[in-house]
Amino acid sequence: MDQKIVLYGFWRSLAAYRVRVALNLKGLPYEERVIDLVKGAQHATEFDAINPQHVLPVLEFEGKTLTQSLAIMEYIDERWPEKSYLPKDAYLRAQVRALSQITIADVHPLVVPRVRQYLHTQFGADEEAQLNWARHWFDRGTQAIEGLLVKNPHAGAHIFGDQITMADIAIASHVIGARLFKANLSEAPTMMRLIEPLLALDPFGRAHPLSQQGAPSAV
Amino acid sequence: MDQKIVLYGFWRSLAAYRVRVALNLKGLPYEERVIDLVKGAQHATEFDAINPQHVLPVLEFEGKTLTQSLAIMEYIDERWPEKSYLPKDAYLRAQVRALSQITIADVHPLVVPRVRQYLHTQFGADEEAQLNWARHWFDRGTQAIEGLLVKNPHAGAHIFGDQITMADIAIASHVIGARLFKANLSEAPTMMRLIEPLLALDPFGRAHPLSQQGAPSAV
């Protein structure tokens, strides 16, 4: 059985970023194959066989494929349980999932390229209007996350104590996305106090969008 | 300890629907408290204490609260493991999660009231334009789901064999949402063959949006 792990990703994809961090935290080596979303490579025939939904990321391992960043992260943690990023306590684990989903399911889907493109075709939204749209949803997400973190009784070095959890990964992707889109992070001191030190850690730093193949040197 | 389960929901919320189905499948009695999203009750002070993110659904049990439909469904299945809707095999379970997320994270977030409202304030989208927006994303989701189900090697009575899984619940919510918004379901025969019989089952039928308090008799 081929033990190699392949990640189909793209530098800018926040979902691919989350999976890279998860793999790095586990110390799992992987090869990333670039699917250039700007050039529409996700619609190419060769990629259709890998993911008929034509979206990133896709994890390929042991002859299997898997999509959707949350499902991939849960699988990685089950398949390689050392250095787990999901708490053992069921209610804590549920809270980690819920907080992760605020950004993965309530913010990120609204700012992906296919949505900004459709705003253009449907409402004539130019680039500035598309950016404002994205910033609006990042800011709404930031407010929601900050509101929850201020009341969070579990905080330690990280959001849920001293263990890095999936929620830290998800919210790190939120912060990186907010910066790429120049959204407002100045009113979320609690979130930034928890996430900023994470971004400097090796597993997060190596996964950063601007450190990937094909990325510009700055945005 | 108070054993009562309370679901804060609203007839139209597809996320609340998913949680109702999950509770019904487990045979867990619950009381639903209506948070009228049309009247903005999610922004009332009393609800802020229950969910500072001001979104539905919220599950309240044993003095705890939990948000986000996927996180709630995973917790219910862990806490009350009988009649599980998550397969025991890790890779199958991951595929159930991935398929669930296609509708919960790629479609549903785009059609919720706060997004349609913002389309109005930002781009002047009238009701017809908002409906067309919602239909577009339902149709894109339907195509993606149908494409995956056609190639799915696991289908039995349900999507992953003869056991109802979280993916069946998620895709049932997609079908119901598509119907509420009068989106196109005619080109998804595989999806409809699997989901239509489910909707007739008691746990799904009792959870249906149009069977809830405050719902209109038809839309």
Image: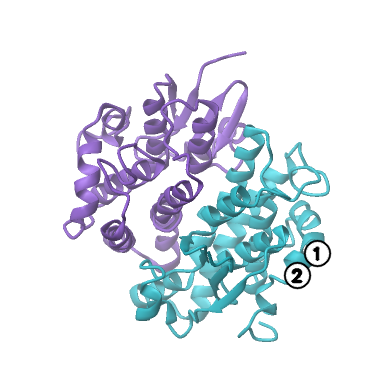
Chain colours: A purple, B cyan
* Residue B74 in the image, given as x and y percentages of width and height: 57, 50
Q: Can residue B129 be seen in this view?
A: yes
Viewer-proximal residue among A190 and A18: A190
Quadrant, the N terminus of chain A: top right
* Residue B127 in the image, given as x and y percentages of width and height: 50, 80
Task: Name above or below for residue A66 compared with residue A91.
Answer: above
Which quadrant would residue A19 be assigned to in this image? top left
Please, what secondary structure does the residue beneath circle 2 have?
A: helix
Viewer-proximal residue among B136 and B23: B23
- Tell me what residue is drawn at x 56 percent, y 70 percent: B7
Is the residue under label 1 in contact with that under label 2 (CB below 8 Å)? yes
Check disc 1 and give the amino acid type: Leu
Distance of label 2 from label 1 (alpha carbons) = 6 Å
Viewer-proximal residue among B165 and B128: B165
* Residue A54 in the image, given as x and y percentages of width and height: 55, 41
Q: Mark 2 lies on which chain?
A: B
Label 2 environment density (alpha carbons within 10 Å; few <14, some 14–19, many ≥20): some
- The numbered mark at residue B201 is 1
